[in-house]
Image (cartoon, rainbow, N blue to C red):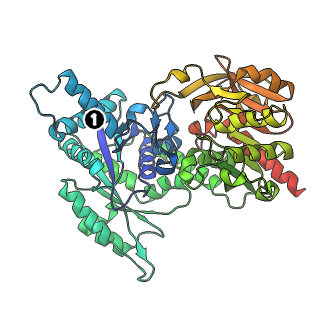
Amino acid sequence: MPTKYVVVLGSLLSGLGKGVVVASIAKLLSMRGIRALPLKFDGYLNYDCGTMNPFRHGEVFVLDDKSEVDMDFGTYERFLGTSMKGEFSLTGGKIFSAIIEKERRGDFLGSDVQFVPHVTSYIVDYLKGVSSRNELDVLIIEVGGTVGDIENHYFLEAMRQLAMKEDVAFIDVTYVPELGSVGEQKTKPTQIALRNIMQLGIQPDVIVCRTEHGLSDAAKAKIAMFANLDNGAVIDDHDVGNIYALPVHLADQGLDKYIMARLGLRDRISPSALKKSMAEWSALCKAMENERAPGVCIAIVGKYTKLHDAYASIKEALYHAAAKSSVRLELKWVDSEKLEGKSLDLGEVFSDVNGILVPGGFGRRGIEGMIRAISYARTTGVPYLGICLGMQLMAVEFARDVCHLAKANSTEFDAGTRYNVIDLLPGQADASIKGGTMRLGLQAARVRRGTLAHKAYGTGIVHERHRHRYEFNSSYEKTLASKGLVISAVTLGGLAEIIEWASSFGIGTQAHPELRSNPMRPAPLFSAFISAAKAQMAARKT
């Protein structure tokens, strides 16, 4: 059967949650036995997300194959429980790099290279190639940005051309505001947006309406009329709190059945198996929404806390682990720069906290505040989890405060430090370009028996994703180990991968285990951390 396509657009404004809608559609189709995967197009001219500022773009998500991609891929993987490939991330930078390469090679001899047909044809061929190589029944294409953006106009034209040759269902994700002074949902912005979409030669098959409290019947009917659709093709997508509940909410409105019928697809599993899968997913959502569960407060001490999307995978991994431990997660966001003043009482800052997590990051801003938080956790016994930079600073703090190596540091922050406990990875000094040159993707490590790490993973070899240029300097291993720092896992090349405190629950990993966590399989280190925080919370109450 030839691949079918679902193209998801966004109108009016960005940030509507197209990625969650796309992931939900992929999840619903997969539950029906359909081989469906998402592909994301982003119009920016960067080749990938690796050099982007997390304050502007959110976190950089890393795949097994070393690709640095948009954070929506984290949503895809968490919903589907599968590992995506870098070829499912298509950017303006990748497209134009390929077009220029083809032109220089002589593929367009005699032609003046233009958006139509050369760029659009390349896009269509690319999508067909991805679909064929991965043997997909359905490719779900998320068009980044908003209809009307100059950055994605040519891509929308390519989608129109794709629909001329293949079976394509178009879905528009829009916003229906409700003005408090009027008390009525206003559909006019969506009507105007639909007109703009249709002027591009695209007729949406489904309209997904983001609202705060649920789409009214009157608004649904009006939107359907202007979109030339039945009322059933206008779908409510109000704020559900738990994003993992969205597939159930969309299925209750028949979205998956509508798409199946539109594309001429049939279920490949039995009705009882489908019912079981939906029930299991619903039960998982309820476990994550258990308001009666005891609350565990985790402080995330970072430098990008003003934009929570910078730590999206960290946040989700904590929620996954909390559901597994039957606790209700309470997050406390702490700006590490504000901890740098020595006069600030950390006991007050962390008085209500059951665990402290320091995530990854780059640059020296806020570093000393993170180190203060780590020292507080170690000396008070508050459970600690360090991710990437959080692991490196855990080693720096231990070197300074326990081993008395004054001003020990990472050469990232102090190139002339006498005690370079953290240093550049071998070969990184010779890297002439920034993009794609870090230690990236899935890497293996050996875990020592009898350690917190081994108890968490339950195995001697682990595989986690990475994204870093600096690493623990193995020449300091004996010095720090003699004072009680445990090197609990090493890379196959012998570099320290996971370190621990012997005195209390404190563990740091150079990897990013949050990138492989999903609701069905929480990241082991996060589960161990939440369990320790739960025990700390219980001990406080006794």
Q: Where is residue 24 in the image (x, y as percent from the top left)?
A: 45, 49
Viewed as shown, does residue 288 lie left or right of 352?
A: left
Circle 1 — which element?
helix
Looking at the rendered image, the quarter that the N terminus falls into is top left
Depth check: 197 or 396 in front?
A: 396
Depth check: 195 or 35 in front?
A: 195
Q: Is residue 316 visible?
A: yes
Residue projecting furthest to the bottom:
181
Determine the image quadrant of residue 235.
bottom left
Q: Can residue 262 be seen in this view?
A: no
Residue projecting furthest to the right:
542
Residue at the location (33% across, 37% down)? 93
Which amino acid type is shown beneath numbered disc 1?
Answer: Phe
Q: Position of residue 36 (x, y in %)?
A: 39, 39
- Note whether 489 is above or below 139 in the view shown: above
- Note whether 140 is above or below 12 in the view shown: above
Viewed as shown, does residue 416 lie left or right of 278?
A: right
Q: Position of residue 103 (x, y in %)?
A: 20, 27
Residue at the location (73% across, 28% down)? 418
Q: Mark 1 points at which residue?
A: 96
Viewed as shown, does residue 104 lie left or right of 355?
A: left
Residue projecting furthest to the top:
493
